[in-house]
């Protein structure tokens, strides 16, 4: 008897077991960590398919792009307010006294290979990040995905949005250019406007009266470490809760509160979501290549006594700027104290209320509807007219505030007086929510009344009888419309069982023998 | 035996036979789709390689973004299409299990906390109280250095500027402004001499000097001597949010803040005529000395800039 040594390819494979090298590695891993069971259930995890579920993915992947490009930028950016004389490749600025922060930002844009691309991608992905978060949040709101058991994840998401806005502001302040410096000046004044503690907060945050000496280094460490650190943790928590509680789904054939219908993690969802990561990165890179953003060398370095005309902040700050522009000059002076209501109300109290109501919404809705059930099936927005109308009212108000942040540009462009624009904006901001609410409510009610609303229309078949009478009857429902992913449970099911036509192949259908 | 409708009913993934229609690709003609995706991938691959080449030869920045962005977009589109059309069409179903534990398990947890914890803490009330007190006090006092070390106390900083009796007004290059320097209708930003390049000089002391006539000009009662030879000086810090009031509308004699469009009438003491600013810009009393230099009579008689609690 001799020991059989596997000498053929097949024999070697047989000796390793049916799964080859990978199988061996997995076995070794499982010996130590026990990955087999959990790993399998992870691979089999079902993700519901709906286009609106990808909005959160855009946010997640632009966050990834922000972090990667941001790390690149930290290698070249110098967070210092020390003055240097600029001698770089951008000639119009040559010989100017600028801060190191400004000089290093210009240098990393022009002297570092791919630096400009990385900087523009960083800025663009931030705008996309916050934009997709807002749209994702609107999706979650209008479909009722925030209801029990997901209230905690709603709060985490809202905190992420707040932190993203704060970090966006901190980030675009860092180049210390003329535009962002004015933004910091405004932020300082807003802090000052807080009653009782405002001056102290301002002096502590800035290390003294504006501009202070520590703004740039402090903003830098907040921007690259503290805020993103918290956000990274919260994104992890957001994902973990999503994984643990499983994704919501729209009602439809075979879908219940107690199951999830869709595609498995591996390979379908993994392929789609990885592709989407590449897509988001690619689009950001294209924007970074072709759409100039924040050209600080054109604005010049910050000097507190200089200013530029027709300057707007990044889009996500615009609603605050609009509110500051249209709010009347109501200042409170009494008892030896001043409350600058013209700043406190639009820039502190208003955003506080807005986010406060958003945090409280799941609780408020539970109190009003007395609905304490678990909800894994989503609402069609038209089936919750009051919620949808309330959301539309808030969006209408925020949109008009967004417009109000460019009163001067509007007046200039349309050649109308600034007074007219200002007063129209004041009226629009106050009136728009009260217009949006009833209109949305009415539309929702109308949509509820339409049988099969939201589905594709089927053609009418017109027939002529022998007597010459014309009759119209609707054609059968499209086969593709059968798993009606938008169909709410409340609407009567008019397709209860699919027509059975054994052995007759419909066009495009495949008959598979089992 | 199954037909198209049955194949669209969700099934459980595990244990499905390999020829189940749910595991077939969603595309009607997978070969065709595969060819399209292959072309997409190939183009993406070329562009991504092109990114490397562009980087290597230090091509202009837009080529870097175009190759990288185009390449990744194509690879991404291809991969999404692969997942959507060529992978198992499904749909698959998975049960959702309640996370809620049994009543016994809940009681057991509550009991562990309440009974076990209670027996330890309630018996040692003194220790518990002292420990809570110590940690609580630390929690409060720990805030002190965290906050207070960050900056100085405001004290009177916000109430005065660096203008004094006799301070020369200089422009941004440090040149003293003389009475003949400005034509009627023109403006210049001035600073207290010696501070034109300092942060504080630029942020706090910045002052707009505007000449609106050739004679002494009175903006308000009690300011009869403040505007010698038609020179008026106003704080350049907007009383709304502190932006520099940098625009001058010559015909209407308005100082305009570009941030939120507050407008101040220079002829009546910069009373706000439009916009969200609540107060006039403070006026700096001026005099022309024997040599013809513009100088300050005193500091501003009120705090400059936006409002704050202690302003009064």
Image: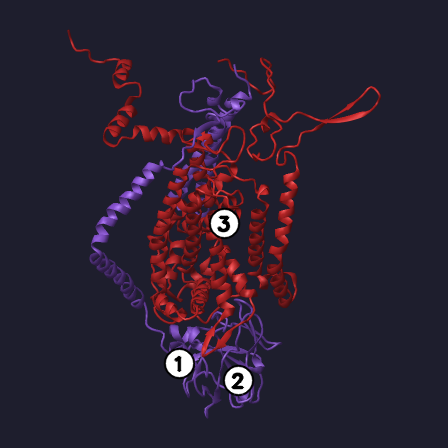
Res. A230 visible in picture: yes
Which chain has been coloured red in this picture? A
Asked if B295 appears above or below A206 in the picture, the reply is: below
- The label nearer to you, 2 versus 3, is 3
Mark 2 vs 1, N-terminal side: 1
**Between B226 and A376, the one nearer to me in the picture:** A376
Q: Colour of chain B?
A: purple
B266 on left or right of B53? right
The disc numbered 2 marks a residue on which chain?
Answer: B
Q: Position of residue B33 (x, y in %)?
A: 51, 26
Contact check, label 2 and label 3, Cβ < 8 Å = no
Quick one: A133 or B166, which is closer to the camera?
A133
Where residue A6 sits in the image (x, y, percent)?
Answer: 23, 13
- Check contact, mark 1 vs mark 3: CB within 8 A: no
Query: Mark number for residue B162?
Result: 1
- Which residue is pictured at 59% across the width and 42% down the height? A382
- Extreme right residue here? A467
Q: Residue B79 carries which label?
A: none
Residue under label 2, please give it: B231
Question: In the rendering, which numbered label is found on residue A367?
Answer: 3
């Amino acid at each position: 008897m001799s020991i059989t040594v596997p000498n053929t390819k097949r024999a070697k494979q047989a000796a390793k077991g049916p799964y080859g090298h990978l199988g061996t590695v997995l076995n070794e891993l499982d010996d130590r960590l026990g990955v087999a069971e959990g790993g399998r259930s992870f691979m089999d995890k079902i993700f519901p398919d709906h286009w609106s579920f990808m909005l959160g993915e855009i946010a997640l992947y632009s966050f990834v792009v922000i972090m990667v490009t941001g790390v690149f930028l930290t290698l070249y950016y110098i967070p210092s307010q020390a003055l240097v004389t600029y001698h770089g490749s951008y000639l119009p600025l040559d010989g100017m006294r600028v801060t190191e922060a400004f000089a290093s930002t210009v240098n990393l844009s022009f002297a570092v290979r791919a630096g400009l691309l990385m900087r523009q991608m960083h800025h663009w992905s931030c705008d996309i990040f916050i934009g997709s978060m807002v749209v994702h949040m609107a999706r979650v709101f209008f479909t009722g995905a925030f209801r029990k058991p997901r209230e905690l994840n709603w709060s985490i998401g809202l905190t992420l949005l707040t932190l993203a806005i704060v970090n966006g502001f901190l980030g675009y302040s860092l180049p210390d250019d003329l535009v962002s410096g004015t933004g910091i000046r405004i932020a300082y004044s807003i802090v000052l406007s807080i009653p009782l503690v405002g001056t102290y907060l301002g002096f502590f945050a800035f290390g003294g009266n504006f501009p202070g000496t520590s703004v740039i280094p402090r903003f830098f460490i907040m921007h690259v470490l503290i805020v993103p650190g918290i956000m990274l943790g919260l994104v992890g928590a957001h994902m973990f809760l999503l994984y643990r509680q499983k994704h919501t789904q729209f009602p439809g054939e075979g879908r219940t509160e107690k199951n999830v219908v869709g595609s498995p993690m591996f390979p379908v969802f993994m392929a789609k979501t990885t592709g989407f990561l590449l897509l988001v990165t690619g689009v950001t890179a294209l924007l970074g290549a072709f759409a100039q953003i924040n050209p600080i060398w054109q604005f010049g370095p910050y000097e507190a006594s200089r200013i530029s005309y027709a300057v707007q902040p990044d889009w996500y700050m615009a609603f605050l700027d609009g509110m500051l522009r249209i709010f009347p000059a109501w200042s409170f002076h009494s008892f030896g104290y001043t409350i600058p209501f013209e700043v406190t109300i639009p820039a502190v109290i208003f955003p506080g209320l807005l986010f406060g109501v958003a945090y409280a919404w799941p609780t408020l809705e539970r109190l009003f509807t007395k609905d304490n059930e678990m909800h894994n099936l989503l609402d069609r927005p038209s089936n919750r007219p009051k919620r949808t109308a309330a959301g539309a009212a808030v969006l209408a108000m925020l949109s008009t505030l967004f417009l109000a942040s460019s009163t001067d540009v509007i007046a200039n462009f349309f050649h109308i007086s600034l007074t007219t624009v200002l007063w129209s904006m004041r009226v629009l901001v106050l009136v728009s929510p009260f217009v949006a609410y009833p209109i949305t409510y009415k539309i929702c009610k109308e949509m509820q009344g339409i049988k099969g609303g939201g589905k594709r229309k089927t053609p009418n078949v017109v027939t002529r009888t022998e007597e010459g009478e014309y009759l119209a009857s609707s054609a059968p429902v499209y086969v593709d419309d059968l798993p009606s992913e938008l169909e709410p449970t409340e609407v009567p099911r008019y397709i209860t069982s699919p027509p059975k036509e054994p052995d007759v192949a419909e066009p495009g259908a495949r008959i598979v023998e089992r | 035996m199954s037909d198209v409708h049955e194949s669209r009913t969700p099934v459980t993934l595990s244990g499905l036979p390999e020829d189940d229609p749910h595991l077939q690709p969603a595309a009607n003609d997978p070969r065709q789709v595969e060819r399209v995706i292959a072309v997409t991938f190939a183009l993406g691959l070329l562009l991504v390689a092109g990114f490397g080449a562009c980087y290597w030869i230090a091509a202009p920045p837009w080529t870097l973004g175009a190759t990288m962005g185009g390449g990744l977009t194509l690879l991404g589109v291809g991969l999404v299409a692969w997942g959507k059309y060529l992978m198992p069409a499904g749909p698959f179903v998975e049960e959702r299990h309640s996370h809620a534990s049994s009543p016994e398990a809940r009681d057991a947890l509550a009991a562990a906390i309440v009974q076990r914890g209670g027996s330890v803490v309630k018996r040692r009330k003194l220790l518990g109280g002292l420990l809570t007190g110590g940690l609580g006090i630390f929690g409060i006092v720990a805030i002190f250095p965290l906050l207070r070390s960050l900056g100085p106390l405001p004290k009177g900083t916000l109430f005065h500027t660096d203008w004094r009796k006799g301070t020369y007004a200089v422009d941004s290059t440090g040149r003293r402004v003389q009475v003949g320097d400005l034509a009627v209708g023109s403006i210049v930003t001035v600073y207290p001499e010696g501070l034109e390049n300092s942060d504080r000089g630029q942020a706090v002391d910045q002052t707009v000097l505007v000449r609106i006539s050739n004679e002494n000009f009175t903006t308000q009662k009690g300011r009869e001597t403040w505007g010698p030879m038609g020179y008026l000086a106003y704080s350049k810090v907007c009383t709304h949010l502190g932006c520099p009031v940098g625009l001058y509308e010559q015909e209407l004699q308005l100082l305009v803040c570009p941030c939120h469009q507050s407008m101040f009438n220079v002829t009546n003491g910069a009373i706000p005529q439009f916009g969200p600013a609540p107060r006039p810009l403070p006026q700096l009393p001026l005099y022309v000395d024997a040599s013809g230099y513009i100088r300050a009579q005193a500091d501003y008689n009120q705090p400059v800039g936006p409002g704050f609690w202690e302003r009064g």
